[in-house]
Image (spheres, rainbow, N blue to C red):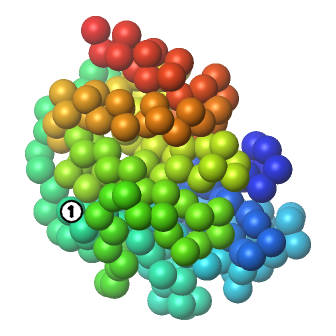
Amino acid sequence: MELAPSLHRIGNDIVAAYLVVTPEGVTVIDAGLPGLWSELVTELASVGRTLDDVKGVVLTHGDSDHVGFAERLRRDHGVPVYVHAADASRAKGGPKPKNGMPPMKLGPLLGFAGYSLRKGGAKTAWLTEVVEVHGGETLDLPGSPRIIPMPGHSEGSIAVFVPGVDAVFVGDALTTRHVTTGHVGPAPAPFTDEPEQALASLDALLDTGATWVLPGHGAPWDGGVAAAVTAVRAAAR
């Protein structure tokens, strides 16, 4: 799905991943669920590209519904996978902190669980090798993605700012569709390790001035980063 020139999404409002397409190649941001592989191939073909054009995957954090097809790209196609050092173990299937159960509604919860199962969520291929980032870097990848530390949802959560597409990819730093309640609109993401820290980290997004705010769960937001951050904090109250 083309959101804007050079900016594409695969998946849906339940789980999403993104592609930045440039003349130099393609950067994938988050890898969703393993079963999004076929959508990746199809989306690449729609712009005249193949898997050989993918130069890197940047993960916003190491949870299973963001790791998705990343190891397959790394193992079978030699694509480097970038993740914050503090989430490297998590992206390799290591332990994660337990956090409280969020509010739930049966319909949205079943929808999330059912979609995850259909897309291979029960068969996560964890990373075996990663390239660690620490925050502040501009990666030598198509679109020159800049890494913004966003601790809170996980210790190593990051946002990824790509100026050329006027977009910041936020993973689970916020959500626009709560996976367990179905609530629509910018709000804190569930299953967050440190909720107060996650809210404080939102300040780091403001300097981007990005029009597009692209979460791992929910509809793309094109109302500007400042409005998104304000809405998340209002929802938290």
Q: Is residue 116 left or right of residue 47?
A: left
User: In x, y percent, where is residue 195?
Assistant: 21, 30
How many neighbours does mark 1 have within 10 angstroms: few (below 14), some (14-19), or many (20 or more)?
Answer: some
User: Which one is nearer the viewer's eye here, 226 or 184?
Assistant: 226
Residue at disc 1, secondary structure: helix
* On-image quarter of the C terminus: top left
Residue drawn 55% across and 74% down?
140
User: In x, y percent, where is residue 64?
Assistant: 36, 59
> Which quadrant of the view contains residue 4?
top right
Residue drawn 41% across and 71% down?
82
User: Which one is nearer the viewer's eye here, 187 or 182?
Assistant: 187
Q: From the viewer's perspective, is residue 112 above or below residue 19?
A: above
User: In x, y percent, where is residue 176?
Assistant: 51, 28
Q: From the viewer's perspective, is residue 15 above or below residue 69?
A: above
Total numbered circles: 1
Regarding residue 147, the answer to whether it shows in the image is: yes
User: Which one is nearer the viewer's eye here, 202 or 117?
Assistant: 202
User: In x, y percent, where is residue 188?
Assistant: 35, 27
Q: From the viewer's perspective, is residue 205 above or below residue 127?
A: above
> Which quadrant of the view contains residue 6?
bottom right
Which residue type does callout 1 highlight?
Ala
Regarding residue 119, the answer to whether it shows in the image is: no
Residue drawn 30% across and 15% down?
236
Residue drawn 25% across and 68% down?
85
Q: From the viewer's perspective, is residue 100 above or below residue 54?
A: above
Q: Name the residue tied to disc 1.
A: 86
User: Which one is nearer the viewer's eye here, 197 or 120?
Assistant: 197
